[in-house]
Image: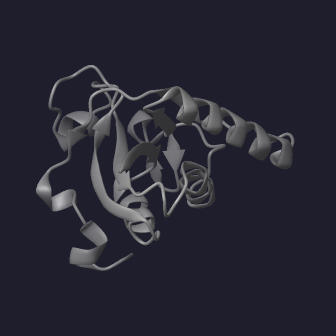
């Protein structure tokens, strides 16, 4: 089993989209990339913790590649909007790839470069940085669309 971590706006939709990918075993919503231990949703939304809303993905690399997960990441959000996805605004909604290995880092950089060439003048603002501590979000955020319906 392998793991991947992405931030692409509100984690509810990101979690839902990755949970539908064959080879993905589990997707957990949470927070990463900040400076506060065990932050709450309210703290993260205050933009004082520097965390991003992220999903931690456990996947079978024999079934789905990291590159394929990156394709889902790019397709399901706008990587050209800084600290914003749709109506959600704030640093917690930033576009981010948190890598666990040097191989993931190189694949992510290559993937970003390829997409940037396709987009031309529209600048990708996605950060690529080493994975930091992952803090699981509160239970009511987990599998949100499955519990409440997709909006």
Drawn side of residue 29 relative to residue 22, left or right: left
Classify residue 54 as left or right of residue 86: left
Placement of the C terminus among the 4 image quadrants: bottom left
Q: Residue furthest bottom?
A: 149
Identify whether 23 is placed above or below 71: below
- Name the one closer to the observer, 53 or 73: 73
Image point (35%, 51%), residue name = 1
Q: What is the basis of the colouring in this image?
A: one colour
Q: Position of residue 140 (x, y in %)?
A: 15, 60
Q: Residue furthest front?
A: 62
Q: Position of residue 150 (x, y in %)?
A: 36, 77
**Residue at the spot x=27%, y=28% of the render?**
133
Q: Quadrant of residue 75 in the image? A: bottom right
Q: Position of residue 25 (x, y in %)?
A: 33, 63
Outermost residue to the top:
35
How many discs appear?
0
Camera-side residue of 17 and 23: 23
**Residue at the spot x=14%, y=31% of the render?**
38
Residue 145 versus residue 131 in the image, above or below = below
In the shown orientation, is residue 14 left or right of residue 148?
right
Q: Quadrant of residue 105?
A: top right
Residue 69: quadrant of the picture: bottom right
Q: Where 102 sits versus 86, above or below?
A: above
The percent position of residue 47, horizontal first and vertical second, equals: 33, 30
Query: Residue, x 49% and y 64% (percent of image)?
Result: 63
């Amino acid at each position: 089993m392998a793991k991947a971590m992405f931030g692409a706006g509100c984690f509810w939709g990101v979690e839902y989209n990755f949970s539908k990918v064959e080879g993905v075993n589990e997707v957990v919503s949470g927070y990463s990339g900040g400076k506060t231990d065990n932050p709450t949703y309210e703290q993260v939304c205050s933009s004082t913790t520097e965390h991003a809303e992220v999903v931690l993905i456990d996947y079978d690399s024999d079934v789905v590649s990291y590159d394929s997960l990156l394709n889902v990441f790019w397709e399901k959000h706008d990587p050209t909007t800084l600290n914003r996805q749709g109506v959600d605004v704030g640093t917690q909604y930033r576009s981010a790839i948190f890598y666990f290995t040097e191989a993931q880092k190189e694949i992510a950089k290559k993937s970003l470069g390829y997409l940037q060439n396709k987009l031309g003048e529209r600048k990708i603002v996605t950060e690529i940085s080493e994975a930091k501590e992952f803090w699981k979000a509160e239970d009511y955020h987990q599998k949100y669309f499955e519990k409440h319906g997709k909006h």
